[in-house]
Image (tube, rainbow, N blue to C red):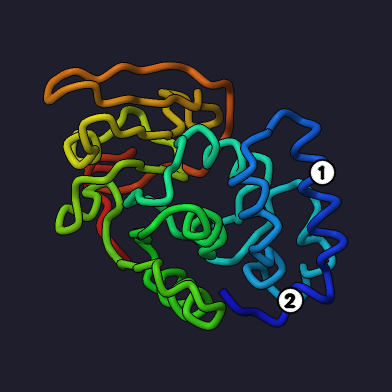
Amino acid sequence: MTNDYNTDRSHERERLVAQIEREGIRDPAVLDALRQVPREAFVPPKLHAAAYHDSALPIGREQTISQPFIVALMTAKLELESTDRVLEIGAGSGYAAAVLAVIAQEVYTVERDRELAEMARQRLQALGFSNVHVLHADGTRGWPEHAPYQAISVTAGGPDVPQSLSEQLAIGGRLVMPVGRDLSQQQLIRVRRIAEDDYRQEKLGDVRFVPLVGVAGWDGQERVK
C-alpha cells in the first residue's frame, strides 16, 4: 500500500489507535491495520480535520463512514488470518475494506449505491489496495462467484442474517453483522459455521447501523439504484 497521507496525520492516527487499544481492542493485526490506513482519504476534504475523531462521519448519499472503534471491533471479531478471503457487505467509502485488506489475502466488497461503489473503487486503487474488489450490486445476495468466504462482515443492520450470506460462509468461517427488528438499534452478532447445516450464534453488544436494504434486507422490493 502506498499513499500520501501518512506524514501529515500519522500522529493523530497513532493517538486514535492508542485510544481504541485502551477501550479493549488488543488484536495486534487490527491495531497495525488501523495505523496503516489513512482515514482522512475516505472522508470528504472538509472533514479531514475530524478524520481521527472516534465517531461516524457523513460521506454523502445519506451514508456514513463507521466509527473507528466499531470498525476495529468488527474486524477483531472476524478473527482473520492472512490467507482468508473476506466478503464485506456495504463498501461505503471503502475504509473498512482497506482495514480488512491489510490483514486478509483478498477482500470482496459489495455496495448497492453505484456512486459510492465507484468512488470506493477509485479511492482503493489510488491507495494501492490491489487485493480489494468492489461490486455494485445488492449486498444481501452476497457475491457467490467467489464463495466460500472465511469471513463475512456486514456493515448495515438487518432483521435477520440473509440466508444467501450464511450459505456463502465457509465451514469454520465467521460472520459479523448487526441484527435486530428495531431500525433504531441492533445487536452485533457473530455467527460461526460449524458444519454444513450447523451455525452457532453469539451476541457481541448493542450497536446502531444504517438499515440493510435489498431483497433479503428491510425492503424486499428495493432494487439497486
In the displayed structure, would residue 203 be above or below residue 21?
A: above
In the image, 183: left or right of 16? left
Query: What residue is at 60 percent from the left and 79 percent from the top?
Result: 2
Q: Secondary structure at mark 2?
A: loop
Tell me which corner region of the image, top left, top right, bottom left or bottom right, holds residue 151. top left
Disc 2 marks which amino acid? Tyr
Q: Residues within 10 Å of mark 2 (few under 14, many from 20)?
A: some
Q: Which residue is mark 1?
A: 18
Residue furthest to the left: 196
x, y (%) of residue 95? 56, 61
Lower position in the chain sequence, tag 1 or tag 2: 2
Nearer to me, 188 or 33: 33
In the displayed structure, would residue 104 be above or below residue 20?
A: below
Nearer to me, 215 or 10: 10
- Tell me, yes or no, whether the two marked residues, 1 and 2, touch with CB atoms within 8 Å: no
Tell me which corner region of the image, top left, top right, bottom left or bottom right, holds residue 7. bottom right
x, y (%) of residue 218? 33, 38
Q: Which residue is mark 2?
A: 5
The numbered mark at residue 179 is none
x, y (%) of residue 195? 17, 22
Q: Residues within 10 Å of mark 1 (few under 14, many from 20)?
A: some
